[in-house]
Amino acid sequence: MIFNETTHTQARIDFQRFDRMVPLDHEHLRVLKGLEKPGDLVSFLSDLIQTFTRESPLSVRALHDALQAHNSSAAKYAAHQLKGLASNMGAIKLAELSEAIEIEIEDGRLPDPLNTKTVLERYRSEAIDLLVRDWKA
């Protein structure tokens, strides 16, 4: 559990539960790979990986900044945006955690900004490493 000292609300995110999850949905990635067309100049999946690599740190930063500012509306938006980016990419661990953060914010509980950012960055990096290693053409 995370305790936010500023607002004295408790976010009930069990980070250990997410640590036990697989980082990527390989079936989802196979479907994305299957959408590629022979002769494409840029691989569809490689383009998605590049977009995820470029956009996801911006969402993590926006979420962190919003949590630090106690701006629940901006934090919810950033968590939702990160959830979408991760879901589209098959980064299920990151997507599930982003959804849990979004739910906590909806319920009026803001997670600790630093701890949240640290875990999100770890999951994001893990997903990118695996995507680049196993899926990028």
Image: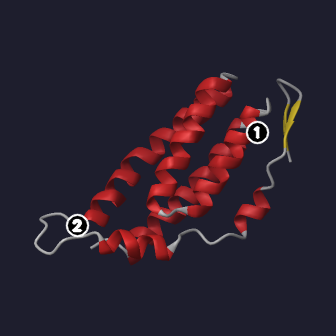
Label 1 and label 2: CA atoms lie apart by 37 Å
State whether residue 92 appears in this view: yes
Location of the C terminus by quadrant is bottom left
Query: Residue 59: where, in percent of width, then height?
Result: 50, 40
For label 2, count other residues whose C-alpha is less than 10 Å away and answer few (under 14), some (14-19) or many (20+). some
- Residue 4's place in the image compared with 69, above or below, is below
Q: Residue at x 67, y 30 (%)?
A: 67
- Provide the secondary structure element on which disc 1 rests: helix
Q: Residue at x 51, y 59 (%)?
A: 125
Whichever of callouts 1 and 2 sits on the residue coming sooner in the sequence is 2
For label 1, count other residues whose C-alpha is less than 10 Å away and answer few (under 14), some (14-19) or many (20+). some
Query: Residue 123: where, in percent of width, then height?
Result: 59, 59
Check residue 86 in the rendering and tell me which mark sits there, or answer none.
Answer: none
Judging depth in this view, the residue of 1 and 78 nearest the camera is 78
Q: Residue at x 29, y 69 (%)?
A: 35
- Residue 1's place in the image compared with 107, above or below, is below
Report the amino acid beneath label 2: Ser
Marks 1 and 2 close (CB-CB < 8 Å): no
- In this rendering, the count of numbered labels is 2
State whether residue 111 appears in this view: no
Judging depth in this view, the residue of 50 and 113 nearest the camera is 50
Judging depth in this view, the residue of 41 and 131 nearest the camera is 41
Check residue 43 in the rendering and tell me which mark sits there, or answer none.
Answer: 2
Report the amino acid beneath label 1: Glu
- Residue 25's place in the image compared with 18, above or below, is below
Query: Residue 135: where, in percent of width, then height?
Result: 37, 74
Please name the residue that numbered disc 1 is placed on: 104
